[in-house]
Image (spheres, coloured by chain):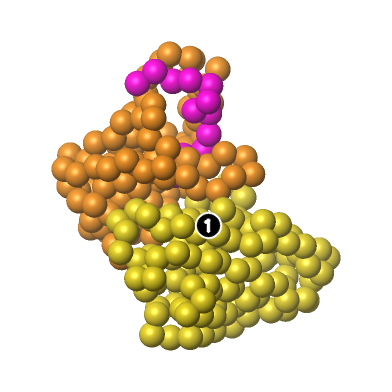
Amino acid sequence: GENVEQHPSTLSVQEGDSAVIKCTYSDSASNYFPWYKQELGKGPQLIIDIRSNVGEKKDQRIAVTLNKTAKHFSLHITETQPEDSAVYFCAPRGSARQLTFGSGTQLTVLP
Amino acid sequence: NAGVTQTPKFRVLKTGQSMTLLCAQDMNHEYMYWYRQDPGMGLRLIHYSVGEGTTAKGEVPDGYNVSRLKKQNFLLGLESAAPSQTSVYFCASGQFSEAFFGQGTRLTVV
C-alpha cells in the first residue's frame, strides 16, 4: 500500500500568520491528493483536493500544491483564524485499494 | 441526505464481551472502511471492503471481523473485547476520490 509521511506533527502559529503542512507519498501512480480537517469530536472532512494534472489549487484562504516529481504535496493556510485549529490529514490515492492517511498535524492558532 | 451513519455513538463493554458496530451509507459507494483512532494518533485502517460481499484486512485487523452483506452496510465485530480495543472507531465510504466519514463510535472496554 501507500507509504505516507506527514510533517510536522504539531504546529502552532499566531492568528493571522500562515501555516504549511507537507505530505510525502511513495506510490508513483497516485493521482488524487486530498486534505482532511478533523475538529474535536467529529470525523474528518475534506477541505481541499487536487488531481495529478494540476499543480496548485486555491479556495479562499486554503491552497494545495503538488510536486509529482518529488512525490509530495502541501496544504497552505493563510491569515489563520482560531477556527482553523484542528487536526489535518493527507490521504493520497493511487492504485492501492486501501485508503491510507498521514499521521496527522495538530494545528493550533494562538490568539 | 444522511451520508454515513454509525451506531452506536458510545458503548462500554466488559472484557470478553462481544459487540457489533454498524455503519450505513446512502451514497451508493462501493468502498467502505473501518478505522480506529487512539489519543494523539492518526487513523489506522482495520478492515475495508471494495464492494458488496467483499472484505479485506487493513493495517490492524487482529481481534476484529467484518461483513458486507449489503452494499450500504459495513459491520465491524469484536468477538472478545480487550482493553486494548478501547478507542474511537470511524467508518468511511467513498469511491476513488473523497471519503465521507461517520461521526464515530467511542468504545471503552473495562
Q: Which residue appears at 60% of the width and 69% of the height?
A: A22
Q: Chain of mark 1?
A: A
Give residue B108's position: percent from left, percent from top.
Answer: 53, 26
Please give the name of the residue rendered at 50% of the width and 51% of the height, measured from the top-left corner: A43
Q: Position of residue B71 (x, y in %)?
A: 20, 48
Residue B23 visible in image: no
Q: What residue range appears in magenta?
A: B79-90
Res B3 quadrant in image: bottom left
Q: Which structural element holds mark 1? A: loop
Question: Circle 1 sits on which residue?
Answer: A102
Magenta-span inclusion, residue B82: yes
The chain drawn in yellow is A
Q: Is residue A11 visible?
A: yes
Residue sitting nearer the eye, B81 or B24? B81
In the rendered structure, which amino acid carries the disc numbered 1?
Answer: Gly
Where is the N terminus of chain B found, in terms of image quarters? bottom left
Residue B81 drawn in magenta: yes
Q: Residue drawn at (37%, 73%), measured in percent from left and top?
A: A31
**In the image, is A2 to the left or to the right of A66?**
left
The answer to whether B96 appears left or right of B109 in the picture is left
**Residue A106 in picture, x, y percent from top left:** 67, 56
Chain letter tied to orange: B
The crowding category of the residue bearing disc 1, from other C-alpha atoms within 10 Å (few below 14, some 14 to 19, many at least 20), is many
| Residue A96 relative to residue A60: left or right | left
Q: Report which quarter residue A21 is drawn in.
A: bottom right
